[in-house]
Amino acid sequence: MRRGKKRFGFGAAVVALSLLASGCGTSGGKNAAENGKNSQPPSTAASGGAIDWNTVKADIRFVYPGTSEAEKELAEQFKARMKEKYPNVNIEYMYLSWADMEKKLSVMLNSGDVPDLTQTQDITNLVRLNGLEDLTPYFEQEGEHLKKDDFLPGTMEYAQEDGKLYAVPNLANSFTMIVNEKMLNEAGMKLEDLQTWEDVEKAAKAMTKDGKYGFGYPLGTARFAFRVPFTAAYSNNLLLSDTSAESKNRYLETLQHFKNLEPYQPKAHLTWGYPEMFRAYSNGEVGMITAGTFFTANVYSINPDIVNVSRTIAYPKGPSGTSAKAPVSNVGIAMFKDSKNKEVAWRLIQEWSSQEFNSTAASVVNVTAIKSTSLDEIIKKSEKIYPKAIEGHKTMLNDFSKLLDESGVPMDKIPGQSEMEVIVQEQMAKLLNDKVTVEEAYASIKDGIDKIKAKLE
């Protein structure tokens, strides 16, 4: 049986956001237990310590996979602000996509070409590569103002392995279904009609007419080819890495669901990544996609009007599911274990987590992971960032608040996921192109995933 069925635990804080919104791994690395062994923070890192922050010098390489225009602008604002505060600290961003980041970092770490900081979601494989610094001692040093209880329950846990903390959460992140409510209504259905996978298929069929399609699944990039069925599978009580005999029927149902949706998708979706999916959705060419809390940041620059007709819900219940579920993780900042600038890197992590910057980050990508961040300030900044879609953005915030509170469950971390993504992408492409049956696709996925698991044992 899959893990992570417990409801996500920060409903009260997210409901507060809702009220405000309505008012306004590869082989060769050491294992996780070895990673960060005897790690100690720099003695001068506590709240500045003996460091003269007006004169300290450092060149910081920061791996940043935020690829939307809003996220890039956010990064450049942080860089400019840090230059004002620390004139001799230079930040160089490495703009790698989430899809490419892990593979490139594996090469860099194995060659000794180690950056200083990285944005993170799932830390599992970077920990297996022995790449990340254990940040636990940094929180415990005398005089430290950043505390573990500053963060919403669940977000810290997602950044931990074997009791060690490898990233500081910045935002809560969830994968959900995004629906063009206008298209849905014009097809004769309402948002509350979407209760089951069968309802999703019915809606996709009803919206497919006049050159428009009901669903858009980006199959051209392995990361996203995996993410869409991964998201849906939570609502069928399935984790895609679970190939046990017990889960076989739920797996077959999941594959069949996407086979059923295929007639209601543009053929081009077979080569899409996220940018192409968001563009098609923003232009009203498809009516439903699987995305998440980062939605507005990705579509606003394409067509701000789409935000005003969009709603988000947890992916509806599958045939063997007990309820709709939305997997929740975090977006955080981690330090590389072999960084040569740990004092400065930790200081920048603190700055990234500050009220000043975290409220800006949350206003761009929706849900903060830090309790003290002013929700009033998040809304106020959102009005400046998304002026042409602010009412729609507030509605989306309300939707996210509700679904995280009612349907949010901790997202499972999957060792070897990046390799599994390729297996799932290959077989889904064959399945949707009528090259294999559902049973054959399942057999190949199971064989591939089982081999990856065996390598990691």
Image (cartoon, rainbow, N blue to C red):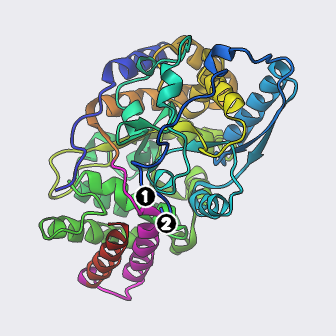
Mark with earlier residue (1, 2): 2
- Which of the two residues, 132 or 285, is positioned nearer the viewer here? 132
Q: Is residue 76 magenta?
A: no
Q: Point out the stretch of residues depicted in magenta.
A: 412-439
- Which of the two residues, 320 or 191, is positioned nearer the viewer here? 320
Residue 358: percent from the left, percent from the top? 60, 23
Relative placement, left or right, of 159 versus 439 is right
Q: Residue at x 36, y 35 (%)?
A: 157
- The image quadrant of residue 190 is top left
Residue at the bottom extreme, as displayed: 435
Q: How many marks?
A: 2
- Which of the two residues, 100 or 340, is positioned nearer the viewer here? 340
- The image quadrant of residue 335 is top right
Relative placement, left or right, of 84 versus 398 is right
Majority secondary structure in the magenta region: helix
Residue 210: percent from the left, percent from the top? 50, 65
Residue 436: percent from the left, percent from the top? 33, 87
Q: Is residue 430 magenta?
A: yes
Q: Amino acid at mark 1?
A: Arg
For mark 2, does the 10 Å Cα neighbourhood hold few (<14), some (14 to 19), or many (20 or more) residues?
some
Residue under circle 2? 26
Vertical position of residue 191 compared to residue 437: above or below: above
